[in-house]
Image (cartoon, rainbow, N blue to C red):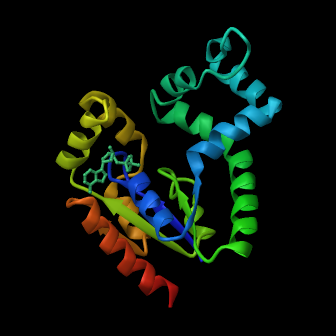
Amino acid sequence: MIIGITGQIGSGKSTAARLLKQMGAVVIDADQIGREVVEQNPALLKGLVKRFGDEILTPKGKLDRKKLAALAFRNNDTRDMLNRLVHPYLLKELNRQMKSLAKRHRLVVIDAALLLYWNLDQVVDKVILIHASQKIRLRRLAERGIGRKDALARQRQQLSYTEQRKRADHVIFNNGTPQELKLKLQKVIAKSVD
Ligand code: ADP
């Protein structure tokens, strides 16, 4: 069974993925794969430099991810440009890992903020959307060192909760404690597995 976990920044996706791991799931982190595919495919890095300029490179010629993120997440056009380039590589690698892990593990979880934007709802068995109120998301992010302005800018790059909700199989409200989140996840997983 392959489960996609998504939600807006600060909603608790990664926390949910971590809890699912404690319950025995194997977790694929889509951000991590995004980083790996750029490192492993010189053609992709070249394409990124062509679109975003040499400034996305470190003095040693490696990708400076923070620079790229700053340039790519300026607006929807630059974000789409980044995704058009990275998407084919990322999807191919995600599919490969998903298939290989699903053979050996009962529960495979994909943690991806952009799960629905990438249309991965078409490849996973169930989508779980993690949601928390904006006030709580911003407070949790502030505690993690991400300021309000930054958090709102990143949030604008993601699909809205209303759009995400339409395509999710389960919505989990993560306004309470991590323990409550864990119990809700256990319930949803029990329902999905049978
Ligand atoms: P996302 O992956 O959706 O951006 P995270 O899982 O990283 O969100 O959560 C954002 C921050 O909120 C983290 O610091 C995390 O530890 C904290 N957090 C998540 N869920 C809860 C919760 N139920 N109670 C308290 N803090 C939480």
Disc tally is: 0
Residue 27 percent coordinates (x, y): 57, 60
Note whether residue 173 is visible.
no
Residue at the spot 41% in from the left edge and 55% down from the top edge: 13
Residue 145 percent coordinates (x, y): 31, 30
Residue at the spot 57% in from the left edge and 76% down from the top edge: 125
Q: Residue furthest top?
A: 59
Note whether residue 25 is visible.
yes
Q: Pick the residue in front: 23 or 135.
A: 23
- Assign the N terminus to one quadrant of the image: bottom right
Q: Pick the residue in front: 187 or 8.
A: 187
Q: Which corner quadrant of the image does residue 41 belong to?
A: top right
Q: Which corner quadrant of the image does residue 15 belong to?
A: bottom left
Q: Residue furthest left?
A: 135
Instruction: Give the vertical position of 165 relative to 33 (above or below).
Output: below
Left or right of residue 105: residue 41: right
Q: Pick the residue in front: 89 or 84.
A: 89
Instruction: Give the vertical position of 13 relative to 73 (above or below).
Output: below
Instruction: Give the vertical position of 115 relative to 192 (above or below).
Output: above
Residue at the spot 50% in from the left edge and 51% down from the top edge: 114
Left or right of residue 66: residue 52: right
Residue 3 percent coordinates (x, y): 53, 70
Residue 163 percent coordinates (x, y): 38, 60
Left or right of residue 25: residue 165: left
